[in-house]
Amino acid sequence: MAKKKFKINLKFAMDAPVTLTFALISLILYLLDSLAFKGSLAQKILLSPTCQTGSLPFVVSQPVSFFRLILYAFSAVNWTALLANLLFVLLLGPAMEERYGSLVIGIMMGVSILFSGVLNAAFCPQSLKGCTSLVFMMIFLNSFMSFSKKKIPLSFIMIFALYIAYGILDKSTGNLLGTIVCVAGGLCGSLFAFLTSPKVKAEKKSGLLNKAEKAAYLEELDSQSPRNASKKSKSDDDDNSTVVGTLKF
């Protein structure tokens, strides 16, 4: 009797290109700065500008100040902070990128980073370093999925509170004003969820759904989008029909 041969056919998939690219660039820059540049790279361009009374004031005539508004997110104070931030980004990012699409999530990330950098340059005497604003953005996005169903997830409250506590109590990065700036940046970036609908990746659905089923699935996802939560509540309030069980009269 012939023995059956079992073959393992596994392929690596770039499931979240924007999230993975950000994580890889952050790791590469940190390694280069630590091993090759001995920390000088971070001091020159991988710190966000500060207010005029701070250690690294924003200067309009210096082009490097504009680069710092973005590049600070790819740095970290130490290995612990880098791994902690990237752990959250890689846990939450792929699911959010699958839901909203790579282009939209990329825009959200850029807005969060830039908004936090501008706020820091306007009000904070200390420079930002790291992608804390992105972590807050993804926490907000993840919670919006429950908010659209008129629920407040306790897990969101605990994660949000613990991460704020970590940002304040960590002696290497502890900074209440900087944490508030990162929360504001994350919230600003996540608000784009109210302007867009979750997307379905065609390559994952093409062999499973026909056109009618795809349209119904997209409509269902769109109804779950945070931007439609207010419309739902309004329509429910205006409905004067009597509900008995699952029948409407």
Image (cartoon, helix red, strand yellow):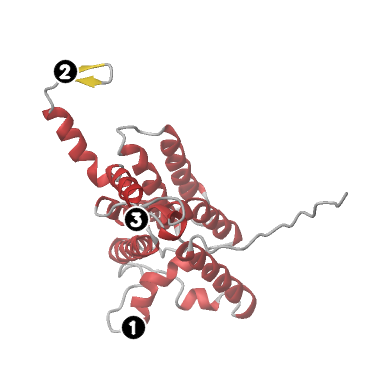
On residue 181, the disc is: 3
Q: Determine whether the residue tagged by mark 3 lies in a helix, strand or loop.
A: helix
The image's mark for residue 242 is 2
Tell me the CA gap for discs 3 and 2. 48 Å
The one of 211 and 177 positioned closer to us in this rendering: 211
Q: Amino acid at mark 3?
A: Val
Assign a secondary structure to mark 1.
helix
Q: Nearer the viewer, residue 198 or 2?
A: 2
Instruction: Give neighbour class at mark 2: few <14, some 14-19, many 20+ (Cα, 10 Å).
Output: few
Viewer-side label of 3, 2: 2
State whether residue 42 appears in this view: yes
Query: Could you tell me residue 108's position as x and y percent?
Result: 34, 60
**Do the numbered discs 1 and 3 sit on residues whose CB atoms are within 8 Å?**
no
Tell me how far mark 1 sits from mark 2, CA to CA. Answer: 64 Å
Q: Give the residue number, with chain letter if any, for mark 1.
A: 63
**Side (left or right) of 81 relative to 47:** right
Cα separation between marks 1 and 3: 23 Å
Q: Residue furthest front?
A: 1
Q: In the image, residue 139 lies at what x, y percent?
A: 41, 47
Q: Give the residue at x 55% y 73%.
A: 29
Label 1 or label 2, whichever comes before in sequence order: 1
Q: Quadrant of the C terminus?
A: top left
When the figure is inspected, residue 69 is found, relative to residue 123, above or below; the finding is below
Q: Earlier in the sequence, mark 1 or mark 3?
A: 1
Q: Identify which residue is drawn at 85% across, 51% down.
A: 3
> Which residue occupies the foreground of this view, 107 or 88?
107
Kind of residue at disc 2: Thr
Q: Residues within 10 Å of mark 3 (few under 14, many from 20)?
A: many
**Res 75 seen here:** no
Nearer-N-terminus badge (3/2): 3
